[in-house]
Amino acid sequence: MGESAKRAVESLVRTLGRGKVVSDPEIVSLYSREASGLMGEAWAVVFPEDAGDVGAVLSIAYRHEVPVYPQGSATSLSGSSVPSGGIIVSLDRMRRIREVSILDSLAVVEPGLRLGDLNMELSRHGYMFPVDPGSVSVATVGGAINSGAGGMRGAKYGTMRDWVLGLKLAVPDAEGSILEIGCRTLKCRQGYDLTRLVVGSEGTLGIVVEANLRITPMPEAVVYGLGFYKSLEGVVDALKAIKEAGVQPLIAEFMDQESATISSRRLGSPIRPEGHLFLVGVDANREASQRMASWIRSVLESSGAAKVTIAGSQAEAESLGLLEVRRGFFAASIEAFRRRLGRRDVMVYIEDIAVPPSRIPEVYEQITSEARKRGLHVVVGGHIGDGNLHPTVGFNPEDPRSRSMVEEWYSKVMEIAVKSGGTISAEHGIGVLKKKGLQMELEARGSRKLAEIMTAIKRAFDPKGLMNPSKVIELGT
Ligand SMILES: Cc1cc2nc3c(=O)[nH]c(=O)nc-3n(C[C@H](O)[C@H](O)[C@H](O)COP(=O)(O)OP(=O)(O)OC[C@H]3O[C@@H](n4cnc5c(N)ncnc54)[C@H](O)[C@@H]3O)c2cc1C
């Protein structure tokens, strides 16, 4: 730690008190790793308890010119939560729900609140916050906003971009200013849409200290259908039949046979996959749910599904473990590569492309063939309803040749997505792992100038380049 860093940490302790600043290296290292397995280093972790504390931290960081890394639960899979020398700002102690207004379709909450806890509270009113990443039980509101997170319900409800009405953002300047951005009304025309700009900005513009979230009623009933297919074409045919019937699925999820089998076994579920897994959920009113259940069964069977299981309600789907098996995809991928490589310590790269659902079978073919060419094995799952695929590859982190093969494949997958009319990241964000991919996508679209505009925006919010530096874009590109 250099002199300026030491002075910054001393100033933080003086201003916030010892109880809110931790500089014990052992503890700091626990906060320096994210779920992707990437590890960084930091000088201290600060635990603000309100917006005023966050403003004070950013003002001190600005004066001493030290980097700041905002952190929720560090479940990022893109390298966006990894520090590289500076101060981690954990929002863990800012978990309050300030207001729930059913009439205004609004919840006002602090950034460290877990999405699962928010939903627990909203369910008492028959409402929900619909964005549901697989990590929903621990993912925080601030982390989800800044990752631009999505989840299983993305097919119907989109991503965080669609559910944040406004926010308070602390920015790095001498005063530690807190900007009120956007509105608390559903309609809002406040000049340029800076709310949607901050959503998905990965902590590179400021720290979200409060959010106005749009909420929606819980569906009256949801009917689920699960089936297994010999080919991905069958899965896409089923999705097509559902959409052509004018039905918008609540969820439409895919797992290849290997990941589905491992996930099911890990969870002790009775589900025994006989092919690729397709799980579809459709909301309906209570009276229509039985008719919907038999319709889903017939769609799945006529598109070639084996072993169709129907759950006539959310409770039945949960008790059969249908959703849990799909939520277990990431853990199942790690398990798959541990077995294949015969070691516990594996590194797993999870892709996050989105392509038009109509192109999924050909994209899947190209991705797996590029993996085979490099001697790699790939497991695939995804939110097929919105074309978001998570092809995943694991390797021995101590083997530089494997790592370089995997990195080459990872770039190739992003190229395939862009060439197929898709994008390099649907919901996990750019972080460090997709920075080159972002430049590639902008260039492929002839939109290089956008990189300059993004850099100018970053400078306008963060002139000294202190907020989560080296993520998303490099200043100077
Ligand atoms: C098993 C598993 C399943 C997952 N499934 C999904 C999925 O289905 N869909 C999906 O989209 N993602 C998924 N993820 C990725 C990740 O969990 C989500 O993006 C989640 O929303 C991140 O929340 P977090 O609190 O862990 O954020 P963190 O990882 O702590 O932070 C993410 C980013 O936000 C920034 N940040 C955090 N809080 C703030 C704040 N208050 N102000 C400014 N910046 C902030 C961080 O600096 C970082 O750039 C999954 C991850 C795992 C491990």
Image: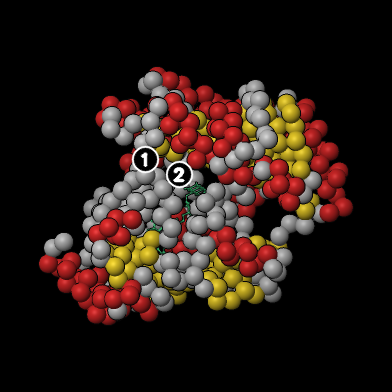
Q: Are marks 2 and 1 in contact (CB under 8 Å)?
A: yes
**In the displayed structure, does residue 82 sit left or right of residue 247?**
left
* Residue at image coords 22%, 65%: 66
What amino acid is found at the position of numbered circle 2 in the picture? Ser
Say which element carries label 1.
helix
Q: Which mark is residue 437?
A: 1
With respect to residue 6, does 27 lie above or below? above
Q: Nearer the viewer, residue 218 or 44?
A: 44
Q: Nearer the viewer, residue 14 or 86?
A: 14
Q: Is residue 419 visible?
A: no
**In the displayed structure, does residue 85 sit left or right of residue 140?**
left
What amino acid is found at the position of numbered circle 1 in the picture? Gly
Q: How far is disc 2 from disc 1 in space, using C-alphas?
A: 9 Å
With respect to residue 278, does 449 lie above or below? below
Quadrant of the image where one finds ligand 1 = bottom left
Residue indicated by mark 2 = 425
